[in-house]
Structure formats: structure tokens, C-alpha cells
Image (cartoon, coloured by chain):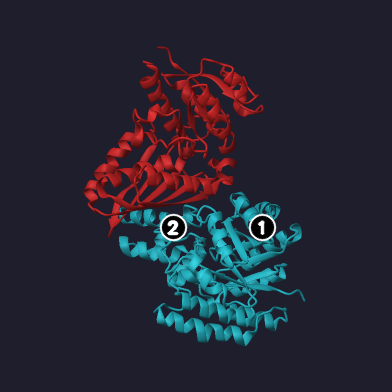
Amino acid sequence: MRKVMLTDTTLRDGSHSVSHQYTLEDMKAIAMALDNAGVDLIEIGHGDGLNGQSLNYGFAAHTDLEYVKAVAGVLKNAKLTVLLVPGIGLIEDLEAVREAGVKAVRVATHVTEADVAEQHIKAAKKMGLFTVGFLMMSHMASKEIILQEAQKMESYGADVVYVTDSAGAMLPDEVFEKVAYLKAHLKVPVGHHSHNNLGLAVANSVKAYEAGADYLDGSLIGLGAGAGNCPTEALVAVLERLDIPKNVDLYSIIDAGDKVLIPILEAHQKPLPRMNSDSLIIGYAGVYSSFMLHARNAASRFNVDARDVLIELGKKKAVGGQEDWIIEVAHQLANK
Amino acid sequence: MKKAKVAIIGPGNIGTDLLYKIKRNPYLELVMVVGIKESQGTEIARQEGIDVTTNGIEDLLKRDDVDIVFDSTGAGPHLKHAPLLKEKGIFALDLTPAAVGPYVVPAVNLDDELLTQENLNMVTCGGQATVPIAAAINAVADVSYAEVISSVSSKSAGPGTRQNIDEFTETTKHALEKVAGADKAKVIIVLNPAEPPIYMRNTIYTKVKNPDIDLITKSVEAMVEKLKKYVPGYTLLMAPIIKDDIVTTMIQVEGLGDFLPVYAGNLDIINAAAIEVAEHYAIKKLGVK
């Protein structure tokens, strides 16, 4: 059986769940537990990636450079990874974290806009980083379009290309179809990143593996935007049942969630991730998962229903990064 | 005096759209279009009866009648063109990220002093759309931080923008600081592929020291009127709203549809601004009436 590589994003996508307020000590403790459990890539930083610090996405407790400096020294085996969304993060930001010890980067664009990542993927490769192309909102494009964009990323030098379900909107057969199509036509490995908005994250990840994916994503107890990501512990347990080889140890990853992450969330007084009416609507309407908390804030500011805001954003075909549209939509609904 | 004689270097999307805008302008006469290869832009220019060369800037430098050049090539080529144009005494409007000369945003800083420069940089489309708003707020409320989220339709973002996205955000950020007067700034750009294409739209967040929303709103509304004079499709999508000391304002730019469709307000606004500067130069410095 083919081995699967696991990327844990508790410390990056999961940052959304704590409004980017991890302390340096939190990050260090969680990263050590993930490394100890055998996770291959550990992604850290602001939920919106390098330079995500903003009024639009929220200010983190620390800059990505500070987080990287804190975590780089404690990892033994895992590749320390960051996210870079062109249009938000700059090549100079990547250079700074590479000098501080980052080994891998995921360069993310909307699924139809891979060419904005040409500069960044090429620069990352030149810096000697393991470079992953991350095609966000893959539910919005056909398999043919996804392949065309994935091939662009491959041509720039990406080591892996991901079918990324940022909205947690993809259904199992769709995941299989899109991943299999990329697997059949790309030379580089394929990955899948899921969100649990429709309760399908683990099932979709297994489907992605069956379709040929070599890289899968998770986060401890499923922490992450919307209803959260694929729970790494559950994914590892299922992979074990299916006899699929991986580097992560089941008990150690369960302990990382139970004994390290949960006490930290309790200290921050943050709820554990779960499906709720807003995350469900995000998956249903196909909206960027990170919109959830911003939509709730806007709904209470303008006294409207967050679900109406999210449905309207789905109709407008908002893409990742357009958190400012949430304010406009909520303001419009309030003045109707 | 007769009209000012102008030339365009780089007849891509921006250059070809400029051609139509110059044709309509009472103060400017397009005498030459300079490319480096045959293209849709050179074809259109020929059809319009304009002198076209595909030999690059050499043929332009042989002429002695050109007053103003619009350079819409790229940062690299403009760095080569700028000293040659200067030597020839031609006023250059730089629509590339080269930024050889100072930034100009007509509604904010175009004055007689700036017109004495031989080369002015048009910032970016996002800068032309958002610097005026940040400047209007800064004038009455003192902006300590400005943050712009610029959304443009995928169809209107050409290869120039896509391959230079870092330069786009950095240049716009610098203009928010230097021209609008924000102490610090940040810029984010998002391409949206929705069909039908979205109009260019920008959200301007400002953190202000004097949060008087009535004063801010009046200042912003006056600025929008000023902009509408040269960018008719510029509208306030959401008038300033305030929470604590954070002011949120949204604007939208509908283009005139000269070369690219109306959704490409991003191309329209930078060109409209360049024409506005050229027109002032023609009137003030060349005595065109």
C-alpha cells in the first residue's frame, strides 16, 4: 500500500479558531507534540498566512516571524511549514521566515488564478523550500480547469499540488473525480485539504487517498475555520484501520489533542470546534470557511442573521480573502 | 496653441484604452504609437490613422514634435526609456511600477510644482482608486493606519499585474503613506473570477485619531465629487461607517468601456488619471487652450 504524508494545520488553519491568539508557548507545546507523534509537515502562523495581520483578517498575538523563531528550534523531524497567499504575503516575508528556519511553504491561490503564484513558487524553490501549490475553493471549478491551473503550478516548480476544499463544500465522489484527474495527468504528487462543514472531512480524505492523493491534511480535534478541518486523530485511526502506511502514531496524536491542545483552548476560553448552523451554511453555500467568525461579528454589529449574510456571499461568488465583502453584505441587509 | 502632441509606448490593454481616451480629449493629439511587435493595439492604431512603429523607442526619439509620452510598457523598459525621454525634453507619464519620478494622484497632489517634474509615476490602479479616500479622511481625522483590500475581476488583471502582484501591493502601500499621508499602510489584492465579471471595488479601512464621522463623511463625499470629474464611474459603494476608531469605506469603479468592458474600472481609472495629468500639463506648461 502507498504511504500517505500528513500535514497538520492546527497551528495555521486552527489559528482561525483562536482568532490568531496563540501564544509562543502554545505554539511550541503543540508543535512539539505533533512532531513527537510523527506528523510530516507542521504548518504554523496566522490563519491567512504570511502578512495576514490586518483589520480585514484580524491581528495575531505575534507575527509569523516570531512564531517561526519560537517553533523552529523545537522540531526534530517535521518540516516547519508556512502558508503564503499571493496578494497578501510577499516574497520578502517568505525570505525572512526561511532564514528563521522554515523548510516548506504552501503557496495558495484561488483555484482559477494559479498564475499569480508564479513569482512566489519560483522564489520558494530558489530558496530551497519544499513547495506546495494550494488551489483553494476547488469546489468552484471543473476538473479540467483545476488540472490546467495545477499544471501551471507544476510548471513553476511546485513539488505537490493540492485540491483544496476551502469551503468544506465538496462531496465524496467529487473529491475522487478531481483528485483522480490530477493524479492521472500531473507528474508531481497530489494532496487534499478538507473542511468539515458538511461532516465529510474524514470520508473525503479517504476518498482522496483512494483517488491517488499522497498528501492529506488534518488538525488536532479538527480545529480550523468553519466547522474545522479533518481531525488528524480520526484520520490516523481510519488510515490504521485501512492498513494505509503513514508516519503518525495513533496514541501520540490523540494525546497531542487531549493533553496539549484542549487545555490550551480551555485557557483561551475558546469553544471546541463543532458543526453549527453557520458552518453548515458555509458548506452548503460554498463559502470560504474563514468567513464564519467574521460573518458572526458582522451579523451582531448590524443585527442581521449570519446565515443570510453567508448565503448572499455564496450568491456573489466571493472568494477567499474577500472578508471585506461580509461587512458590505451585512450593512446592505440591515438597510433593506 | 494647437493641441499637445502625445505618444503611447506599449499598446497593450492600457495603451490601447489610452488611445481612445486621447482621441476624445480636446487638449491632446495622438501622433505616434510605439510597440515592439505587431499586435491588436498596433492594428487599432493604424486603423485610426496614427503613425505606428514596432521598432521600439528609437523611432519616437527621431521626432521633434512630441510633448508628452504615456509609457505603459513595464518597469524594466521604462527604466531604459526614462533617461532618453528626459534628454529629449519630453514629459513622461509612467504607468509602470518603475516609479522613476514622484507619484501623482490628480485629485490629491497634482499642482504646478509637480508639473515641473519631467517624469511622474501613476502609482497603480488600486492607488488611484484608494489614495484619494485615505487622503480625504487623513485631512480631517489624521490617519495612523490605512488598509486597502482591492478586488478586481480576473478578466481585467493582465499578465503585468499577475506577474508583479508583490510590486502592486508595495507601490500602492507606499502611495497611501507618501501621498495620502497615512502613518502606516497595508494593501491586499484579490482576483475574483465570478461571471459576469465584478466591477473593480476597494475597501478602505482607516484607523483615525479624530473619529468625527460627520466630518469624515463630508470630506470623503467632496473627494468623490472631485474624482467623478475625471472618472465618471467612480462611486461610493458604502459611505464611511465607524466602530471605535476604525472607519470603513467602500468604493466601486465602473469603467467607460473604451477598450475593455466596463467592469475593468481598474484600467479605466489609472488611464483617466494619466489623461488628467497630461491635460493639466498641456494647459499649464504648453499653453494649450
* Secondary structure type for disc 1: helix
Q: Which of B240/B288 is in front?
A: B288
Position above or below: B45 against B158: above
Q: Quadrant of residue A193?
A: bottom right
Q: Quadrant of residue A330?
A: bottom left
- Chain A tint in image: cyan
Which residue does the image show at 24% across and 53% down from the upper left? B210
- The C terminus of chain B lies in which quarter of the figure? top left
Q: Which mark is residue B238?
A: none
- Mark 2 vs mark 1, foreground winner is 1
Which residue does the image show at 58% across and 20% down from the upper left? B61
Let me know if residue A234 appears in the view.
no
Position above or below: B63 against A283: above
Residue on which the image places disc 2: A323
Give the x, y percent position of residue B4: 45, 18
Position above or below: A210 against B136: below
Label 2 and label 1 in one chain:
yes
Question: Chain letter of disc 1?
Answer: A
Give the x, y percent position of residue A233: 59, 81
Count of numbered marks: 2
Residue on which the image places disc 1: A125
Q: CA distance from mark 2 to mark 1?
A: 30 Å
Name the kind of residue labelled 2 in the image: Glu
> Which circle's residue, 2 or 1, is located before the other in the chain?
1
Q: Which of A139/B17 is in front?
A: B17
Question: Chain letter of disc 2?
Answer: A
- The N terminus of chain B lies in which quarter of the figure? top left
Give the x, y percent position of residue A279: 47, 69
- Chain B tint in image: red
Instruction: Evaluate if marks 2 and 1 touch, with contact meaning CB atoms under 8 Å apart.
Output: no
